[in-house]
Amino acid sequence: MGYTEYADICPTCRGARTGRRGDRTPRVSVIIPVYNCRPSLDRALRSVSDQTIGREAMEVIAVDDGSTDGGGAELDRWAREWPGLRVVHQPNSGGPGGPRNTGLDRAAGEYVFFLDADDHLGPEALERLCAMADANGTDVAIGRYVGVGRRAPRFERDVPRTTVLAADPPVYDSLSVLKLFRRSLIERLGLRFPTEQLSAEDHLFTARALFAADGISVVGEYECYYWIDRENGTSVLQQGGADAARHLARIGEVMEFVAGEVPAGPDRDRLMARHFLNEIFSRFGRRYPGLDPLEQAATRDGARGLFEAWWTDGVGARFGARGHLIAHCVTHRLDGLLTRVVESGLDGPAPEVRVEGARVFQHYPGFRDPEYAVPDARYEITHRVRQRRRLDAVEWRQDRLRVRGYAFLTEIGADGQSAHLVLRERDGAAEYRVPFEVTAWEGELPEMAADIDLASVAGGGPLPAGHWDIAAVMTAGGIVREGPLYPGKGAAVQAPGVRIVPVKGGTPYITPYFDGEAGPLALRCGGLGGGPAPVTTDAAAMTPGPALDLALSVRTAVTAEITVAALLRQRGGETVIEIPLPARWTVDGVVATGQMPLTALAPGRWDLWQRITVAGSADERRVQAPAHLPDTGRGIQPYATEKGNLSLLVAPPRNSGLLQRLKIVRG
């Protein structure tokens, strides 16, 4: 049987840390404030009861904060069947801080975890969080949140140890108390919650803990905490939270604390911007126009002090025109324009965006209206324009290299921008452009492709030998953004292999590759770079005469000006026999076939070579031996060298039987 306490009747029980559990210290104390959440209460309690860490490792303190919906009686029913559940009943305290304080006063665990009764846990949450904190000696562990009917902070990878100032992952973005804390940290700092506060009551508690913590861990690869918005919309936050005066005063305390911990500069600006986004601008959302005039005035007055104290250029750089205009209207007391700005785009399209030279403006109400004299800079969003880009595929298509993916500029409509791929010489100044055009739309993302004719891309001719980087360039008016093309996260984009293409000043090979293990797309022009040659031997057969029938597959990205020849070179001599191999086109290039007479070959070893010539660019390489070699018995024996190349052994006259007796030495 669990333990039930009436805090208003038995105040001396407060601070009795062991309750019904004797002297054993629990691994974790789970504190659950309960107020009029009967529909979700069973789910929350069951998610704790079923934790894989085991009931014996937990103490659960559920504090009924004066519920009127039968939640208190339900807690007592659970306590009768669950020895580890301690129920405390107390009069309503006016917010979740009061019952959490009551739970903290009774907690005995090594760790403390706060769970709201609307929410629930993944079965392994407490086991994983405690193990992560144990393994890394950290004071705070944050589990992955799953928002149900609401947005939630995103933590999607495990991070054994980090700090509050780390930008990745941005642990300060989550100031809810729904985390695991080492209890000694809470007691050392004397942390407790303000009472009679309906929202943001946990922000200062969490901020102080994060800054004082000896390390913070993240369990992001397991769904620990399911954060629920009530379907009937009756939670305090769904109804707007605390009144503006108390809410903004509380946020001001947290911002003042941050300013005392972090010097002015980029780190402070980033943390302050989090408060402006989540707790200040949110007060100028859909509810603002419908508030009574006194609450509207309180919202403006409370926000004005925060804008005047903490809004800097570094903070403003993180916001667009709407944020800048709200800040300007509040601080300059332009109440009428503020309401128009807040209402703009709520139920219709966002205000129009226009490019003027190298600047971009969003036309919210009051733009260049002499009545308000708001500076253009408050409407400018040039700093918000980013290039988004991704490589989806790179493939050879006959005489073109096709690059597929997308690139576009944020903030600016699709009709106002154009795209190119630029091929830029890595060790030189040359660059050449190819259109990167939209072929279709996938939702809000464009599907784009560029077909590069590498035989003529360089002003009508081939690229010079060397390495060439490929970047996507976006232009809108005087706005230009560019960057390399990387495969999308988790995408398995393969380089398509080398092709024969004219190269100025080098051998006729072009190889698309990724620069580094997961780097951007680039081209190697001239030379194979250690890769396989783009020519394979389909067949080699001896015919009466004698003659050698040869068939080569040549992977090329040109449809004209290519010639293929086979050459026999006498090893140790100067004799060279050259035979053109007529070519026919296939999907992947050409197949070159021909017959080489062998009647005049002198005894000895002869090596077979190929010569590929494309638009004046030529290369000679050995011919690879086919999978099956003919055995003629006519005094000429084809064989494969140690490197897999095709050679011939020619026996002296009237000594052809020697071939049958010799063990061919690979050479």
Image (cartoon, helix red, strand yellow):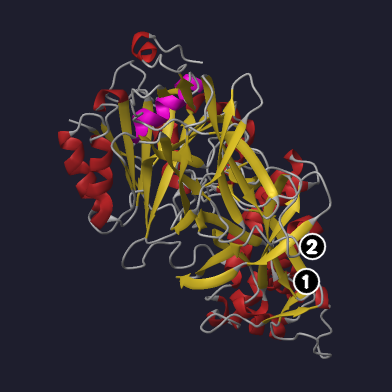
Q: Split into 4 quadrants, where in the image is the N terminus? A: top left
Left or right: residue 532 compared with residue 361: left
> Is the residue marked by circle 2 packed among few (<14), some (14-19), or many (20+) residues within 10 Å?
few
**Where is 576 relative to 303, above or below?**
above
| Residue to which mark 2 is pinned | 308
What's drawn in magenta, residue-wise? 125-137
Give me the disc on residue 268: none
| Residue to which mark 1 is pinned | 331
The image position of residue 613, as x and y in percent, is 63, 48
The residue tagged with tag 2: helix, strand or loop? helix
The image position of residue 290, as x and y in percent, is 53, 81
Mark earlier in primary sequence (2, 1):
2
- Residue 136 within the segment the image draws in magenta: yes
Q: Main secondary structure of the magenta part?
A: helix
Q: Is residue 516 visible?
A: no
Q: Are marks 2 and 1 in contact (CB under 8 Å)?
A: yes
Residue located at (38% from left, 11% from top) = 658
The image position of residue 616, as x and y in percent, is 70, 52
Residue located at (77% from left, 57% from top) = 431
